[in-house]
Every structure is written in structure tokens, then in C-alpha cells.
């Protein structure tokens, strides 16, 4: 739930990111928006003073890539660019399943017995995502975040579909289903198994699984720097929207 910081310089809408704080062993905050009649730097300086940030604490914000005023104001206060993300989406009514019939296979839902293996797979698997790209965080803490995220997804009983090969988990897709859409939360192929055609098999099979459930719309989010996955979504017929710039501030 968002909070509001108010000072003589204006106001900032933000949220404490407790999960990231535990993973990174710091204080992590996300700013959603702000309003000021002065400069944002003045407002932000008062905000970080009130939050008592110390070395290693992280503040981040994200905004539409074409909102240059917001981005410039954030830059002036010490925020730096980390990545641009986009949202692949597809209406499954228009998906041509026949194009992928030769790679689609049955997937299997993960359970508690798969937790340890999936946590290990998730560790070191997402080097192209923003927390790994931010050198102030480092690979070890970023890896830990994705591993713990997987732990939470299993504990929350999220639908995690597994791609198997000779009894071994070689890929997964974690999903959240609502009435309106299915969100692909986190997915990919096991490290060391890239370049074997498993990526298209995983994504096409996950999409086929959603269609069989009666899902009409699938949406997800990726970094534009993740070229291999971008190509997979394009090949499957996804469209792309909502380009967003992600900016970090490290105390």
C-alpha cells in the first residue's frame, strides 16, 4: 500500500519494498509520483533525509519512456538509468497454434517437492534483468532475490508450469490467473540449456496451456535488453506496449 510523504517542498507517493529490503539487506523504496512547486531535487533531498537512508539503501522509480520531464527531474536528483521495460501481450483468439504444433508439449504443475530445485534454477538465471544490471547491487544479491521470489511463488500456490526433459526440469513459467487475463510472472529455461530450442517449446507450450484453460489475454513484462526473449515473444505473435524507463538511486 502506498504512502504519502509531505514537506514544505511538495509531496511524494511511495511504498516500502519489504521483499527487496530483505533480499538486499537494506532499505528499498519505490516512488510512484511526486508534486512540487519547487525543484524535485529539493523535495527528494527532504524525503531521503526523513527516511534516514544510509549507504547501500535503494530508491527506484519507473515512468513512461516518453515522459522526459519526469525522467530529467529524477536525473537531476541523482537517479540513474537502469533499463527500459516493455509489456508483451497477446489475445489468444488470434494465436496461430498450428505454427508451433511440432514444439508444443505437455507441461506439469510444480509442487512443494520441486521448490529446492526451482529455487536453484532461478538463482543466476536472470542476469539480464535490472537488479543484476545495477552494479551497486551485485550479482549475488540479485541472484538471491530471484531465488527467494521463486520460493514465495511456490508458497503462494502460484501456477508454475514446468517443461521437462527426461525427468528433469529444463524450464518453467510462473503465472497469475485472473478473470480478465493471465500474467506471466517469471519464466525461462534452465541455465546451460539455451540454444536447444527449449525456449520456444516452453513459451509455446505455456501459451497453449493458457488457451486450453480458456484464457483470452496473456501479458507479461521484459527488459528490452533481453533480445532472445524479445525474439521469442515476437515469433509467437505477441505485441508490445507500455515502454517504461526504470531509474535507481543508491544512497
Image: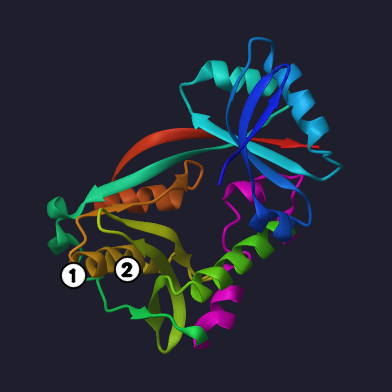
Q: In this figure, which residue is indicated by the disc labeled 2?
A: 201
Please tell me which residue lies in front, 49 or 176.
Answer: 49
Residue 164 image-quadrant placement: bottom left
Q: Is residue 168 above or below residue 75?
A: below
Image vertical order of residue 128 relative to residue 160, above or below = above
| Relative image position of residue 97 (x, y in whole percent) | 16, 62
- Res. 191 in view: no
Mark closer to the observer (1, 2): 1
Q: Secondary structure at mark 2?
A: helix
* Tag 1 residue: 212
Residue 250 in percent (x, y) is at 77, 38
- Residue furthest toward the top? 37
227 vs 33: above or below: below
Residue 48 showing in the rendered view: yes
Q: Which residues are magenta?
A: 113-140
Q: Residue at x 31, y 67 (%)?
A: 206
Marks 1 & 2, CB-CB < 8 Å contact:
no
The residue closer to the viewer here, 225 or 111, is 111
Which quarter of the figure has residue 104? bottom left
Q: Which quadrant, please, contains the C terminus? A: top right
Q: Is 73 a magenta residue? A: no
- Give residue 78's position: percent from left, percent from top: 74, 26
Q: At 72% across and 60% down in the image, what residue appears?
A: 22
Amino acid at each position: 500500500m502506498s504512502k504519502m510523504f509531505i514537506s514544505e517542498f511538495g509531496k511524494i507517493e511511495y511504498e516500502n519494498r519489504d521483499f527487496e529490503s530483505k533480499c538486499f539487506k537494506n532499505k528499498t523504496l519505490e516512488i510512484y509520483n511526486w508534486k512540487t512547486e519547487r525543484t524535485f531535487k529539493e523535495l527528494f533531498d527532504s524525503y531521503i533525509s526523513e527516511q534516514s537512508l544510509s549507504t547501500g539503501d535503494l530508491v527506484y522509480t519507473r515512468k513512461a519512456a516518453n515522459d522526459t520531464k519526469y525522467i530529467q527531474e529524477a536525473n537531476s536528483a541523482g537517479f540513474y538509468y537502469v533499463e527500459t521495460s516493455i509489456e508483451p501481450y497477446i489475445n489468444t483468439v488470434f494465436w496461430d497454434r498450428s505454427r508451433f504444433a511440432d514444439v508444443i508439449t505437455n507441461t506439469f504443475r510444480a509442487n512443494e517437492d520441486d521448490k529446492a530445485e526451482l529455487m536453484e534454477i532461478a538463482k543466476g538465471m536472470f542476469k539480464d534483468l535490472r537488479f543484476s544490471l545495477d552494479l551497486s547491487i551485485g550479482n549475488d544479491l540479485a541472484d538471491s532475490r530471484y531465488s527467494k521470489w521463486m520460493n514465495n511463488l511456490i508458497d503462494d500456490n502460484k501456477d508454475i508450469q514446468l517443461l521437462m526433459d527426461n525427468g528433469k526440469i529444463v524450464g518453467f513459467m510462473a503465472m497469475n490467473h485472473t478473470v480478465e487475463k493471465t500474467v506471466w510472472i517469471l519464466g525461462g529455461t534452465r541455465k546451460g540449456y539455451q540454444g536447444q530450442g527449449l525456449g520456444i517449446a516452453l513459451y509455446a507450450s505455456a501459451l497453449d496451456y493458457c488457451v486450453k484453460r480458456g484464457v483470452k489475454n496473456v501479458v507479461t513484462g521484459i527488459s528490452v535488453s533481453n533480445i532472445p526473449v524479445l525474439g521469442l515473444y515476437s515469433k509467437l505473435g505477441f505485441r508490445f506496449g507500455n515502454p517504461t524507463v526504470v531509474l535507481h538511486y543508491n544512497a
